[in-house]
Image (spheres, rainbow, N blue to C red):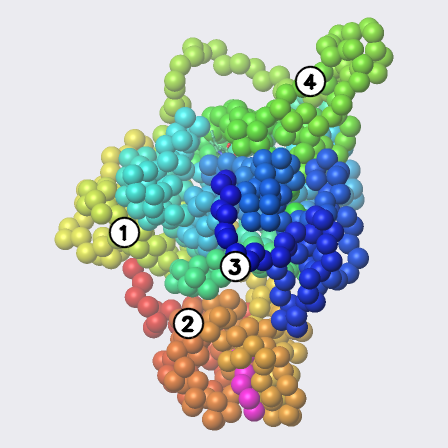
């Protein structure tokens, strides 16, 4: 850096390193010239001293060390160099999948013992609370992408048990795209942004994804789920979670029982409407993260029931599918779910990076009494996660980070490596040894793999023929849905395939749909404007008509409740204070939070002449962020807001998204401008009871009147 010698009068030095007196007093406008002493006076308060990473107290955190007041910065400035170097390294490679995530601390409480099946203390000590950390994520988008794309949601739980960490790394959908880990890089590459152009971000609606899928019939069951409303959840607090694979529970005698793990949200399942998800992406890209943060920090702790499906090898032999195939699920009607515990998330992380970003999940983290199955997808995962953490977190000691470290004692002779944070003592770094009685040694009571008898068969790259049926469960899923859910699946397929530029890919997809359900194929073909129905894809096996499973619906699992939901009330000057109070009380009594929306953030002066502050300004708080809305307006405000696009969109969208709307006489002008027609979900603002009843569900009957569905 060269010194620029400027002749003439120079400004007075602004450095405080010489402890010079402030040259002038801070002005009322809180201006400073970067003088550290001035800044300290301005900010006020008593603070602990700022230090370098070596503990050296820093006197000036505003100015770099310069050779002269207007001269070059000195290389000697170790304080600056340390700060900038650390900053330069603040980002680590984001996760190749599931990069965008939100997480919380909580606990698991066992309510029913599985001691008949397993020795795992986590599942045998009733009443015991095991601390845990749960991270939810989208799959395809980058770390800074939106929260509401059509996507699978990751549901990863790290249980810090007394016998080591158990990681249940699942999703909100109980099946997966592929049967073998060999295909994972392909499916992920296909869904991520296309490599030559760098878009689309966080979206499956593009050629490469559907090209891959159209050539991968095993994905068809998962595609039905991904096109269903499961992929556009209303809240992370309202999704189910699934461990997906079969795991083994192993008892003290070494006997094994298969288990599938399930999480059930206490608030019930709920999804958005696709148009709502799209608009939410703009209104609040952090919608799910904010929702989780606000719920936990306000004491409304999200909760899930934990259930298991237990079955024996003999039972599995009779299933009309192979339970080791991750593209299949076990209907609850076939093997019922037993609820054995609950998870409560009650603490938001102190630091996003240290915890949510650095948490490293791994399906290979299990505890004695639990073991893997031979699911070829799970087998590949056992390798991939540890490997990815090595690059993502920079070395083999990431397990020592506080968020990853077990909360039970852990010790071995692994040593050294990048970022070793422990200081092992003594000369013994091997086993067995006789020199140090404190050095760790393998114990007979430790983890033992289930002694599974080996097949008498030859090795090879084999896809077993019990994995060959790709359509029966896809058909079962589609036919188990309610009529609105089927319409959403068909419409989602039309939307996604309409973004595909390559005609033969669109046609191939419709060919697969013909094997799933011919009526679905026809609806999608009509939605795409295909002249004729493409031939059905070749199927390796006959597609079965499995009995419908209502447990696979969302609408069937929605709870008629306002708990955990949010109601928005649009007000303006002169609004009826009593009506607002009654609506608020009714909504809060039903478990909802209430937010006031007004044209100005300062709020409105109501009919009782009191000022009601707003939680959100109208233009920045559209109705998509609420589950139901009410409008309480004077005639004058109603007429005025009928010409205000944000107010008109507020009601038009609430109506289009099938939400309950309460409106008083003054608000009718806005309703009219928004094209809101009277129906059972549009009620008088004076009838709080009717409003709450309507708000507890979506107005499914309204949907065909507001949009064309495939
Ligand atoms: Fe995976 C992350 C869930 C198959 C390789 N996966 C990751 C996360 C979740 C899942 C929830 C994010 C964890 C977090 O919050 O940090 N993955 C699944 C499920 C699968 C699955 C439910 C199938 C049933 N995954 C799968 C396969 C492979 C991977 C077959 C590779 C062979 N997954 C990874 C990974 C990630 C990952 C590359 C990226 C970041 C990470 O691990 O920590 O290793």
Residue at the far top: name it.
434
Q: Nearer the viewer, residue 380 or 637?
A: 637
Residue under label 1, please give it: 499
Using a 10 Å C-alpha cutoff, classify the residue at mark 4 as few (fewer than 14 neighbours), some (14 to 19) or many (20 or more): few
- Range drawn in magenta: 569-574
Residue under label 3, please give it: 287
Mark whose residue sits in front, 3 or 1: 3
Residue under label 2, please give it: 653
Q: Residue at x 47, y 39 (%)?
A: 97
Q: Nearer the viewer, residue 152 or 413?
A: 413
Disc 1/disc 4 C-alpha distance (Å): 52 Å
Using a 10 Å C-alpha cutoff, classify the residue at mark 2 as few (fewer than 14 neighbours), some (14 to 19) or many (20 or more): many
Task: Kindly indicate the quadrant of the structure image that contains residue 560.
Answer: bottom right
The answer to whether residue 244 shows anywhere in this view is no
Q: Label 1: state its secondary structure.
A: loop
Q: Is residue 704 left or right of residue 262?
A: left
Above or below, 619 relative to 380: below
Q: Is the C terminus in the top left, top right, bottom left or bottom right quadrant?
A: bottom left
Q: Position of residue 382 (x, y in %)?
A: 54, 26
Disc 2/disc 4 C-alpha distance (Å): 59 Å
Above or below, 622 relative to 550: below
Disc 2/disc 3 C-alpha distance (Å): 17 Å
Q: Residue at x 49, y 76 (%)?
A: 618
Mark whose residue sits in front, 2 or 3: 3
Task: Please tell me which of labels 1 and 4 falls first in the chain.
Answer: 4
Task: Please tell me which of labels 4 and 3 falls first in the chain.
Answer: 3
Question: Residue 415 shows which numbered tag?
Answer: 4
Task: Please tell me which of labels 3 and 1 falls first in the chain.
Answer: 3
Q: Nearer the viewer, residue 488 or 3?
A: 3
């Amino acid at each position: 850096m060269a010194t620029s010698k400027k002749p003439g009068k120079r400004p007075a030095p602004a450095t405080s390193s010489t402890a010079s007196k402030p040259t002038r007093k801070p002005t009322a406008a809180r201006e400073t010239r970067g003088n550290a002493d001035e800044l300290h006076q301005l900010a006020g308060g008593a603070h602990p001293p700022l230090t370098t990473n070596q503990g050296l107290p820093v006197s000036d955190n505003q100015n770099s060390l310069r050779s002269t007041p207007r001269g070059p910065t000195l290389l000697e400035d170790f304080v600056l160099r340390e700060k900038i170097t650390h900053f330069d390294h603040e980002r680590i490679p984001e996760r190749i999948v599931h990069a965008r995530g939100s997480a919380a601390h909580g606990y698991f409480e066992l309510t029913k013992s599985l001691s008949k099946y397993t020795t795992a203390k986590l599942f045998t000590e009733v009443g015991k609370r095991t601390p845990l950390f749960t991270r939810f994520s989208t799959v395809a988008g980058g770390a800074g992408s939106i929260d509401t794309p059509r996507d699978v949601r990751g549901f990863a739980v790290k249980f810090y048990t007394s016998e080591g960490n158990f990681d249940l790394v699942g999703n909100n959908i109980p099946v997966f795209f592929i049967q073998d880990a060999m295909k994972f890089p392909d499916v992920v590459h296909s869904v991520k942004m296309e490599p030559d152009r760098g878009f689309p971000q966080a979206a499956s609606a593009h050629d490469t994804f559907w090209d891959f899928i159209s050539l991968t019939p095993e994905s068809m069951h998962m595609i039905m789920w991904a096109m269903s409303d499961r992929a556009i959840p209303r809240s992370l607090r309202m999704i189910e979670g699934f461990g997906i694979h079969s795991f083994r529970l192993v008892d003290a005698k070494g006997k094994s029982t298969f288990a599938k793990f399930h999480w059930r949200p206490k608030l019930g399942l709920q999804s958005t409407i696709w148009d709502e998800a799209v608009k939410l992406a703009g209104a609040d890209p952090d919608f799910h993260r904010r929702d989780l943060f606000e719920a936990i920090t306000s004491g409304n702790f999200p909760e899930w029931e934990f259930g298991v499906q237990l079955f024996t090898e003999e039972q599995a032999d009779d299933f009309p599918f192979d339970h080791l195939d991750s593209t299949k699920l076990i209907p609850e009607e076939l093997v019922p779910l037993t609820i054995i515990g609950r998870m409560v998330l009650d603490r938001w992380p102190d630091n996003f990076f240290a915890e949510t970003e650095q948490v490293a999940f791994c399906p290979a983290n299990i505890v004695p009494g639990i073991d893997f199955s031979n699911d070829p997808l799970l087998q590949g995962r056992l390798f991939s996660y540890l490997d990815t953490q090595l690059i993502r977190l920079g070395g083999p000691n990431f397990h020592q980070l506080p968020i990853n470290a077990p909360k039970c004692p852990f010790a071995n002779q692994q040593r050294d490596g990048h970022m070793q944070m422990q200081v092992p003592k003594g000369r013994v770094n091997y086993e067995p040894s006789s020199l140090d009685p404190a050095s760790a040694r393998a114990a007979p009571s430790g983890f033992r793999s289930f002694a599974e008898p080996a097949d008498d068969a030859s090795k090879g790259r084999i896809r077993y023929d019990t994995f060959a049926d790709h359509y029966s469960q896809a058909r079962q899923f589609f036919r188990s849905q309610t009529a609105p859910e089927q319409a959403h699946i068909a419409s989602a397929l039309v939307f996604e395939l309409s973004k595909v530029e390559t005609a033969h890919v669109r046609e191939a997809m419709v060919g697969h749909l013909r094997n799933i359900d011919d009526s679905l194929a026809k609806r999608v073909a009509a939605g795409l404007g295909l002249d004729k129905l493409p031939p059905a894809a070749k199927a390796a096996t006959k597609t079965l008509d499995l009995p419908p499973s209502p447990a696979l619906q969302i609408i069937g699992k929605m709870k008629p409740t306002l708990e955990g939901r949010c109601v928005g009330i649009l007000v303006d000057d002169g609004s009826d204070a009593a009506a607002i109070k009654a609506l608020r009380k009714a909504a809060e009594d039903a478990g909802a939070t209430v937010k006031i929306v007004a044209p100005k953030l300062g709020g409105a002066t109501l009919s009782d002449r009191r000022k009601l502050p707003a939680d959100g300004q109208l233009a920045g708080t559209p109705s998509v962020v609420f589950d139901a809305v009410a409008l309480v307006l004077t005639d004058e405000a109603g007429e005025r807001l009928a010409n205000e696009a944000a107010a008109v969109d507020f009601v038009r969208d609430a109506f289009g998204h099938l939400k309950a709307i309460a409106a008083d006489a003054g608000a009718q002008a806005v309703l009219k401008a928004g094209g809101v027609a009277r129906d059972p979900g549009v009620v008088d603002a004076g009838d709080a009871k009717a409003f709450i009843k309507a708000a507890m569900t979506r107005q499914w009957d309204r949907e065909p009147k507001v949009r064309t569905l495939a």
